[in-house]
Amino acid sequence: MWPEIERNLNPEQGGILRGTNFIHGNVFPNLSLLNVMLGRDLKHPPTPFLTFRTWEPTGPTSMQVWSWFLIEKTAPPAYRQVSYETYVRTFGPSGTFEQDDMENWTECTRANTSKIAQRYGLNHVMGIGVPPATDWPGPGTAYPSSYGEWPQRAFYREWLDWITA
Amino acid sequence: MTTAASTSAGRDTYDRAVQFLYYEADLLDTGRFDEWLELFSDDIEYRMPVRTTRSRAAGPGFEDAMDFFTEDSASLAMRVRRLDTEFAWAEDPPSRTRRFVTNIRVESAGDGELDATSNVLIFRTRGDSAAPEMFSCRRSDVLRDRGERLVIARRTIYLDQTVLGGYNLSIFF
């Protein structure tokens, strides 16, 4: 993958990618990606893997999720296997992280159908007023912290543009 | 061997395999996961292939290259050990499960091993929901005779669903 990265990014951008282990994001509206490094069992050191999601609403309170595992075609077979196992056991449908996330999302959805929850808007103000990073080589805008709701606000801003266009 | 008989391995062997699978289901339904782990060989291969809907000519739709579970002894141990922590939110409070194991068929596979297939229906409820989640599957096991006890050396779980019948897979099959 590095030749493509070197061809499409400048050295400063490539350097940031090279030094980044944990990447998670969403391409509007419903394609999410996660690249993390986790252990696949009790014995072995962490292995990176890449997963994509598509979120397909099937009703106001239900969602069908497609979960994909991706690996470079040219990766060595042993690495492909280990990366795959890591995905299945952590963020696949039975994964140790995924199990809990499904619990969270299901309960959030249930709680938000309640009378009281329907009375109020969701609060997405975290990080508002924090200026963007000045040393980000682009593209886009970056903020100097992981703790903020810039992605949520960007998502709904884009959504508003689409439905009012 | 007759195709209609549920075993070619002899009545005693059949009964032993049946008792073993009932015991295993009871361990899972009563949350005795550490004891459940001891039922597996060190070289266990535990898989649940992803299933897709295919035309009749293309076969039953089980994928070779993608699993819902792809486990060995170290990863099953990780899953069980995790349940003992305070961070396993998906199973705390735990699911209420009831496993119905039927249609058990047992064949001798040589080298002290048995091929055992079973149909399993899992009924599960969580929280205060009265509506159950249901998982129906066929299990294909290789059971190994360790003298005083049997162990599971290989398990493949063939689900009867392409989209999961529950919102997560935090239980064992």
Image (tube, helix red, strand yellow):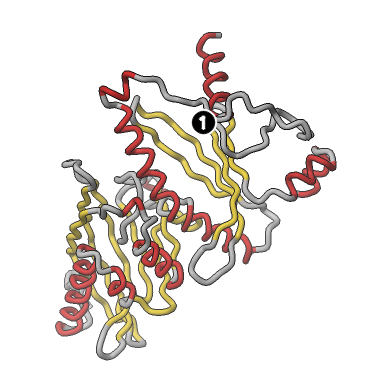
- Secondary element at tag 1: loop
Left or right placement of residue B118 versus residue A154 in this view: left
In the image, what residue occupies the spot 36% across and 58% down?
B86
Judging depth in this view, the residue of B134 and B64 nearest the camera is B134
In the image, what residue occupies the spot 52% across and 9% down?
A164
Horizontal and vertical percent position of residue A4: 78, 44
Judging depth in this view, the residue of B15 and A101 nearest the camera is A101
Q: Is residue B163 visible?
A: no
Q: Quadrant of the N terminus of chain B?
A: bottom left
Q: Is residue B145 visible?
A: yes
- The local crowd at label 1, few if under 14, some if 14 to 19, many if 20 or more residues have their Cα within 10 Å, is few
Residue on which the image places disc 1: A30
Horizontal and vertical percent position of residue A3: 81, 47
Judging depth in this view, the residue of A8 and B66 nearest the camera is A8
Q: Amino acid at mark 1?
A: Asn
For this orientation, the residue located farthest to the bottom is: B147
Left or right placement of residue B135 versus residue B12 in this view: right
Horizontal and vertical percent position of residue A53: 51, 40
How many marks can you see? 1
Q: Chain of mark 1?
A: A
For this orientation, the residue located farthest to the front is: A129
In the image, what residue occupies the spot 20% across and 45% down?
B132
Vertical relation: A51 (above or below) A8: below
Vertical relation: B40 (above or below) B59: below
Horizontal and vertical percent position of residue A113: 29, 26
Q: Quadrant of the C terminus of chain B?
A: bottom left
Judging depth in this view, the residue of B95 and B88 nearest the camera is B88
The part of the image, by quadrant, that contains residue B84 is bottom left
In the image, what residue occupies the spot 45% across and 54% down?
B63
